[in-house]
Image (cartoon, helix red, strand yellow):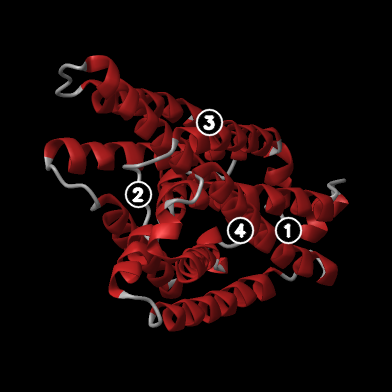
């Protein structure tokens, strides 16, 4: 059975986590393990949430070429960081309490996602193309506003915005992680419990309703889960738009079937494995600090192009 392929994936992830924690460990061991464990937990929960959220989004959209990042979450995050630095200055931004700032950013991102999804639902559950197009336009608009605002910043303030605009796992706040971790784990559990309904949703709205599925209600719940997963992950470490697409594509290739009871754990595990293995490679073996997000975006972009070209060739 294809589900058996989850076992070696779980073993690889466990091995990667152990290597990340214990490789070249030296005194003071307790302090170093504490720092590594915090970073590792952030890598795992963000990777898992990104992979699962992308599978959910592709299921309700009926399209394996899209990802939640396409609806403008990353652009909104950058816009929020730019406005905060513009309003408070680099010194004021640096002194913001981390937990309230995290909660505000999460609320803004999740609220924007739910509002956009709510417009979709008022027009009917089948209007997902308009959702994607609206998200693209929103992203372009926010990037334009962010670019204009960044021209008003001092060079030192612009550097702060640039640093905050890319995903970083090196300075994850433990208080934020203590809140984000359980929330993302709960969202993943709820998504997995919906697996059988998601399998029916793949048949299309009309067929699913004929089989007794409340498609519109399921769509509302799934889109809310996606908004929460992406908002919390982005507010915790920053945007990694193509990570979920990379994990979802690898999960489909690994399993060879669309059953969500296995597909969701596979995408979550692969998302976590990509981040853990990548961070281990660049940080422990190569000594780099900020390369991982760039590499993941590059590989995810290549996967996106490959999927588009393969579909166009059919």
Q: Circle 4 sits in a helix, a strand or a loop, which is it? A: helix
Instruction: For the residues labelled 3 and 4, say whether their Cβ atoms are less than 8 Å apart.
Output: no
Seen as rendered, the residue at the extreme left is: 286
Tag 1 residue: 204
- Residue shown at the point (78%, 59%) measured from the top left: 205
Label whose residue precedes the other's in the sequence (3 or 1): 3
- Residue shown at the point (23%, 53%) measured from the top left: 291
- Residue shown at the point (59%, 76%) measured from the top left: 138
Say few, some or many: other residues with alpha carbon within 10 Å of mark 4 (under 14 / 14 to 19 / 20 or more). many
C-alpha gap between disc 4 and disc 1: 29 Å
Q: In the image shown, does 284 or 125 lie closer to the viewer?
A: 284
Q: Is residue 292 visible?
A: yes
Tag 3 residue: 178
Label whose residue precedes the other's in the sequence (2 or 1): 2
Label whose residue precedes the other's in the sequence (2 or 4): 4
C-alpha gap between disc 2 and disc 1: 38 Å
C-alpha gap between disc 2 and disc 3: 17 Å
Location of residue 141 by image quarter: bottom right
Label whose residue precedes the other's in the sequence (4 or 1): 4
Tag 4 residue: 109
Label whose residue precedes the other's in the sequence (2 or 3): 2
The mark found on residue 168 in the picture is 2
- Residue shown at the point (39%, 30%) measured from the top left: 38
Say few, some or many: other residues with alpha carbon within 10 Å of mark 1 (under 14 / 14 to 19 / 20 or more). some
């Amino acid at each position: 059975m294809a589900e058996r392929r989850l076992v070696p994936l779980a073993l690889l992830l466990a091995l990667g986590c152990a290597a990340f924690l214990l490789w070249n460990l030296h005194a003071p061991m307790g302090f170093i393990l504490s720092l590594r464990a915090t970073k590792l937990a952030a890598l795992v929960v963000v990777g898992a949430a990104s992979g699962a959220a992308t599978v959910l989004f592709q299921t309700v959209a009926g399209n394996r070429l899209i990802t939640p990042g396409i609806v403008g979450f990353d652009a909104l995050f950058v816009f929020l960081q730019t406005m905060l630095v513009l309003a408070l200055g680099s010194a004021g931004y640096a002194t913001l309490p981390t937990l309230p700032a995290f909660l505000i950013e999460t609320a803004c991102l999740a609220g924007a996602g739910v509002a956009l999804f709510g417009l979709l639902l008022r027009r009917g559950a089948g209007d997902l193309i308009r959702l994607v197009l609206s998200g693209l336009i929103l992203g372009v608009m926010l990037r334009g506003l962010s670019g204009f605002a960044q021209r008003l910043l001092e060079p030192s303030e612009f550097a702060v915005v640039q640093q905050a605009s890319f995903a970083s796992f090196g300075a994850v706040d433990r208080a934020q992680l203590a809140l984000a971790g359980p929330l993302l784990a709960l969202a993943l559990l709820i998504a997995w419990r919906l697996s059988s309904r998601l399998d029916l949703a793949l048949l299309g709205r009309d067929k699913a309703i004929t089989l007794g599925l409340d498609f519109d209600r399921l769509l509302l719940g799934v889109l809310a889960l996606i908004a929460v997963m992406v908002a919390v992950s982005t507010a915790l470490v920053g945007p990694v738009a193509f990570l979920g697409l990379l994990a979802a594509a690898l999960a489909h290739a690994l399993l060879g079937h669309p059953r969500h009871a296995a597909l969701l754990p596979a995408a979550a595990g692969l998302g976590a494995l990509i981040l853990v293995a990548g961070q281990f490679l660049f940080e422990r073996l190569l000594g780099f600090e900020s390369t991982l997000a760039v590499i993941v975006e590059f590989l995810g972009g290549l996967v996106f192009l490959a999927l588009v070209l393969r579909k166009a060739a059919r």
